Amino acid sequence: MSETARPLVVIVSGPNLDLLGEREPEIYGTETLADHVERASVSAARLGLALEHVQSNHEGDLIEAIHAARGRAAAIVVNAGALTHTSWSLHDALAAFDGIVVELHLSNPAGREPFRHTSVVAPVADGLVAGFGGLGYELAIEAVRRMLDGGRAAPSANRAAGDKD
Ligand code: DQA
């Protein structure tokens, strides 16, 4: 398969994920974001997918990255950090993306503080990978590959009616 024929996956990483490796290692581990992206790249290459990664601590930059993926990327894997729990702007940007959306977290937010139990990304995601640390990056890429192989094209039946279509 030529490089241009490879479906593109964009990993979007939100605030504070640039500090992985130093930040609360008891929760997020000692691997850096670069380590996780490298792991995802290896999986993507093995599975015939192209990969791009964007990290920003700024909500607007993340929204722009999602806009830039429209019509270009087959999937977005998004770990929005704490914006997961608050950002309706990210929700709306993802709703305007017509490919696969995988919500990703290193930790399992559902088992943590109550403010982490709400995800505003979830209603516009096809699925969620959470709680597996760096392995989650591989699992998310694998999920994208399998959804593409299963003929999944936007919009998804997994999403609540009216939320994204
Ligand atoms: C996180 C979980 C969020 O609640 C938190 O704010 C993060 C990281 C995770 O990957 O586990 O920044 O998204």
Image (cartoon, grey):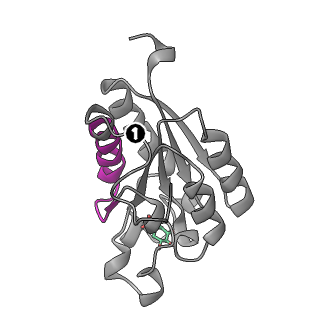
The residue wearing badge 1 is 153
- Compared across the picture, whether 55 is left or right of 99 comes to right
Residue 101 appears in view: yes
Q: Is residue 129 magenta?
A: yes
Magenta stretch, main secondary structure, is helix
* Picture coordinates of residue 27, whole percent (x, y): 38, 71
**The N terminus: image quadrant:** top left
Residue lying at 37% horizontally and 31% vertically, measured from the top left: 44
Q: Is residue 90 magenta?
A: no
* Picture coordinates of residue 87, whole percent (x, y): 61, 71
Q: 30 or 158, which lies in front?
A: 158
Give the residue type at disc 1: Ala
Give the answer, above or below, for where 56 lies relative to 34.
below
SS assignment at label 1 = loop
Residue 58 appears in view: no
* Picture coordinates of residue 161, whole percent (x, y): 42, 65
The image quadrant that residue 86 belongs to is bottom right
Q: 4 or 38, which lies in front?
A: 4
Give the answer, above or below, for where 67 lies relative to 27.
above
* Picture coordinates of residue 152, whole percent (x, y): 34, 40
Residue lying at 34% horizontally and 78% vertically, measured from the top left: 110
